[in-house]
Image (cartoon, rainbow, N blue to C red):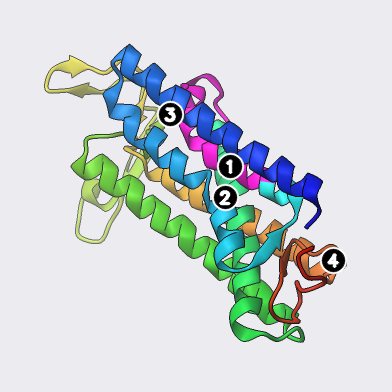
Amino acid sequence: MHKRERHVKLFGTILCEVFAFLTIIYLLADGEADRLALAFGTLLLALLPMLLEKLLRCRICLPVYLFALAYAIGPMLGHCWKLYYTVPVWDKLLHICGGVMFAILGAYLFDFLVKRKDLPAARAIFALCFSVAIAVLWEFCEFGADTFLGMDMQDDTVIHGLTSYLLGDSLGMTGSILNIQSVSVNGLLLPMDGYIDIGLIDTMLDMLLETVGAIAACMIILLDKDRHPIIQNYNSINYYCIRRVT
């Protein structure tokens, strides 16, 4: 690895660590202790690309390394610095980027474990399944946080109609409520012109976007045919191995 590239990676990692540390100080000063866990988590997440290179003895190409660092601090920016609320597409962009990142990692893990370069279709399928599995596990985490910690990670969506078997007139028949304009709970009129779906739409859309990102990454990997290696392994000759560290 060129010395300049190592320096850029180290500088990017330190910058993310300093930013996360300053965020912790800001949250403590502002009395927002409930957001500290994510800021502390970001301190660890920003180290993952460097740890991955060390543990698996591989080289992540510089653009993807920096992309991974940006992705690592994305949730902290959204939750601690309120970008989830001021930039409506922030959460969806992170999920697309997550689909791309985990598909890249899945493709590398396939070659690392199988050590064959003549199975491009199998590698793409494994990368896609790996990325989608991570997306599902993350939604489990969001559901757990909302259920047991009283958070609202599965964002609610206001809808104006619903269909359910619970509204049907007879067994096995659905019923519908359309054109919902107001909802009252325990005599309190909710301050929105519709019904709250309690996170289902957000969860499904998140998984869909992560899948789209994963498919896009897998297609690029297939079409590139390893002309531009993303991750290079220093120990074995496989799809990503081009040269040893210098």
Report how far apart the C-alphas of labels 4 and 2 lie in the structure: 20 Å
Q: Nearer the viewer, mark 1 or mark 2?
A: 1
Near mark 1 (Cα within 10 A), the count class, few <14, some 14-19 or many ≥20, is many
Q: Work out whether 127 lies above or below 5.
A: below
Q: Earlier in the sequence, mark 4 or mark 2?
A: 2
Instruction: Name the kind of residue labelled 2 in the image.
Output: Gly
Q: Earlier in the sequence, mark 1 or mark 3?
A: 1
Residue 169 vs residue 140, the one in the foreground: 140
Whether the residues at callouts 1 and 4 have beta carbons within 8 Å, the answer is no
Instruction: Name the kind of residue labelled 3 in the image.
Output: His
Point out which mark residue 224 bears. 4
- The residue at 58%/68% (across/down) is 56
- The residue at 36%/20% (across/down) is 27
Which residue is labeled 1 in the image? 71
| The C terminus lies in quadrant | bottom right
Whether the residues at callouts 1 and 2 have beta carbons within 8 Å, the answer is yes
